[in-house]
Amino acid sequence: MLYKRCSGCGKRIPSNIVCECQVNNARKRYKEYYKNRRSDREQQAFYRSKEWLRCRQLRVTTLLGIDWYEYYVNNKLVQGYTLHHIEELKECEERALDTSNLIYLTQANHIKIHKEYAKSFKDKKRMQNILFKCLEKAKDEFGIG
Ligand SMILES: [Zn+2]
Ligand SMILES: [Zn+2]
């Protein structure tokens, strides 16, 4: 009988056989895919919900539509565009509608901040601290929030 080495696990197996690990990997990938797809759908439903739309409107009004991160980091007063969950929806559902977890950001800052989040756990925590600090300052200095 001819043998081959499985490219996945390196086991020696008959050449006409598909290694079990390939099937297991496929199953794992599918499960992962399915899980992500489901949570994407749940997120989309959340962003369309009445509770969220009401919360969003209130929060943006309270913040005067200003991106307070831009104000404290770059000293510029600009209008926000996206209301961002500092502690992300997927990591902290309890804070989904907690206004103290919501900051209004320009599109550019929103992208920049999500890039920081994606770098590492430490970078994410650091950035979240900066964002909470900005909101704290807006409260201290202008009574906003
Ligand atoms: Zn294998
Ligand atoms: Zn965001």
Image (cartoon, grey):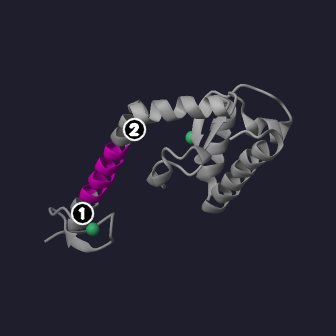
State which region is magenta.
26-39
Q: Position of residue 8 (x, y in %)?
A: 33, 64
Specify the label residue 46 is tagged with: 2
Does residue 105 show up? yes
Is 30 within the magenta? Answer: yes
Q: CA distance from mark 1 to mark 2?
A: 33 Å
Q: Compared to 114, does 106 lie above or below?
A: above
User: Are there few (<14), some (14-19), or many (20+) residues within 10 Å of tag 1?
Assistant: few
Q: Is residue 121 left or right of residue 33?
A: right
Q: Residue furthest front?
A: 143
Specify the label residue 142 is tagged with: none
Residue sitting at x 62%, y 58%:
120
Q: Position of residue 12 (x, y in %)?
A: 25, 74
Q: Earlier in the sequence, mark 1 or mark 2?
A: 1
Q: Quadrant of residue 61?
A: top right
- Disc 1 target residue: 24
